[in-house]
Amino acid sequence: MSLFKKLLAKFTGNDFSVAELTDLENLLIEADLGTEVAKRVIESAKSRKGENFLDSVRATLVDSLSKKSRNIALDSNNPTVILIVGVNGTGKTTSVAKLANYLKRENRSVLIAAADTFRAAAVAQIQTWGERIGVPVISGNDGADPASVAFDAAKRAISEKVDYLIVDTAGRLHTKDNLMAELEKVKRVIEKIIPVTEILFVLDGTTGQNGFAQAEIFNDSVGLTGVIVTKLDGSAKGGIAIATESALDLPIKFIGTGEGLGDFAPFDAEAYLEDLTSL
């Protein structure tokens, strides 16, 4: 359902009432666009009005999105290392499998590092996914040092000259300094022998404004290059995508819309905005 369906019919004249603009701002905030983006939309509505209202809204939302590339990087000299990070319960490990499947379907060779060693179930889960999609998974013993697992996987990625190494890391609370330090260690150890090209944060699309607060801390810690938004299956409001990009200037590179391997695709900003604002 369009975010603006209830209000667009009211914005056909030359003047907007305070009540109408307040209703619109509240709707935008409820859709998880965030207060800053909502305010910019309202200011645009005030300045353009009438028949130009929808165009001004779309223009404001476009301006709020990151201008950085949404393409997944490809290192022409080394295996491209993609570090997948995030908090617990966002669909991180499943996103690793979906991304590996997507890259394989693009005729790229892929290796997965099961560096979420805190949970045996997580290692077993990614191993099962690996068998299903035909992608090798490098793992260690139960409770192994995640940096050690990632390092071993990086050495194998180099020796086998694969296109991509995807490193699954443990979900961690962004407020736990020791866990964030461990994530920094994983990155640092890999980079002893190979650059980490992409660091993608997995964002639960249903978490609202707390989602990009989490992303901001991860960005400060390890330097994110992009975002994977999960759970955009119709129940999510979806505006968090714009709020995140506006706040962090990080491009959303992929979205997950369900549990299946095929429920994963590159983020199409133009199509997203059209769906968000269409009548």
Image: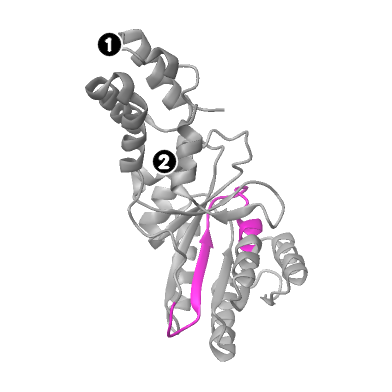
**How many residues crowd around disc 2 within 10 Å: few (fewer than 14), some, or many (20 or more)?**
many
User: Picture coordinates of residue 121 (x, y %)?
Assistant: 74, 60
Mark sitting earlier along the chain (1/2) = 1
Q: What span is in magenta? A: 75-96
Instruction: Point out the image quarter for the N terminus.
Output: top right
- Picture disc at residue 15: 1
Position above or below: 170 against 35: below
Residue 83 painted magenta? yes
227, 101: nearer the viewer: 101
Residue 23 painted magenta? no
Position above or below: 158 against 168: below
Dot in front, 1 or 2: 1
Q: Which secondary structure lies at badge 1?
A: loop
Tell me the amino acid under the disc marked 2.
Ile
Q: Tell me the residue that label 2 is attached to.
A: 242
User: Picture coordinates of residue 45 (x, y %)?
Assistant: 29, 23
Q: Which secondary structure lies at badge 2?
A: helix
Q: Quadrant of residue 226?
A: bottom left
